[in-house]
Each structure stands twice: as structure tokens, then as C-alpha cells.
Amino acid sequence: MSEKIDLSRYVLSENDEFMNANQKAYFRAKLVGWRNDILREARETLGHLAEESANHPDLADRASSETDRAIELRARDRQRKLISKIDAALQRIDDGTYGYCEETGEPIGIKRLDARPIATLSIEAQERHERREKVYRDE
């Protein structure tokens, strides 16, 4: 395993060898940190929902509480899907495919990965994918 990367000091560079050990360690730390933040927020939400589940005698309060609960649960579902994507990215780091476009096999690009560490497509491949989706959606 590579040495621990201090995210506050490490600077990504397009000039370095693509997906070298430091870059892999950087993205692993970034992904694990993101995942931990999401899990912490989920625990806080569960605690909040448990507190809010107390009986509300007023019908309007109960309806408002149920709406809030539904919104929170939808957000949690989106975050569950995001965790799945983060886990998949961590697996790609382990198997050596992280950072490479799943469509073309070309490097995705450090700037794109830094902005969206779960990206699986290069910008060009993503744009092609979105154009195809738009064509099918418009038909």
C-alpha cells in the first residue's frame, strides 16, 4: 500500500505519470473521505428522523413532518447510490482501471477526476453519451 497522502499538501499535476502511486493514494483518500462524510450525514439524519417520529397531535404538523421525512429519505437513497459509485471507484483503484474511460480506455484526465472522482467516462465520451440520450429522449 502507498504511503499516506496529506491532501492539504499534495498537488495534482497533469505533468506527472498518469495514475502514479501518489495520485492513486490521493484519489483513494478523497473517495474514502467523501464516503465517510456521507455515512456520517446518514447517521445524523437517522437520529433526526427518530427524534421527529414522535407523535404530532396537530394534523398539519404531522403532514409537514411526513413531507420532510419523505424528502430526507429520497436524499438518503441518492446518497446510497453515490456510495455505491464511490465503492466502485475504490475497486477500480484496486484493480488498476481507475482514471481510464470505460468507453475508450483513454485517461479521463486529472482535472475531471479531481472535480468528479467517481467519473467513468472522459469528457468527450460523456458528451457523446449525453447527446445520444438527448436524441432518444426527443424521439
Image: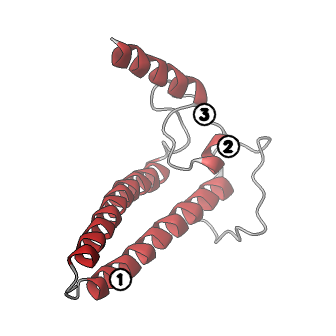
Between 134 and 132, which is closer to the camera in this rendering? Answer: 134
Check disc 1 and report the residue beneath it.
48
For the residue marked with disc 2, what is the amino acid?
A: Ile
Between 94 and 33, which is closer to the camera in this rendering? Answer: 33
The image quadrant of residue 64 is bottom left
Q: Residue at x 78, y 57 (%)?
A: 11
Q: Residue at x 38, y 60 (%)?
A: 79
For the residue marked with disc 1, what is the amino acid?
A: His
Where is 18 relative to 73, above or below? above
* Secondary element type, mark 2: helix
Check disc 2 and report the residue beneath it.
110
Q: Residue at x 59, y 30 (%)?
A: 123
Q: Position of residue 15 (x, y in %)?
A: 80, 41
Q: Position of residue 7 (x, y in %)?
A: 70, 67
Residue 107, labelled with which disc? Answer: 3
Q: Residue at x 34, y 16 (%)?
A: 136
Tell whether 132 sits left or right of 14: left
Q: Position of residue 120 (x, y in %)?
A: 48, 38
* Secondary element type, mark 3: loop
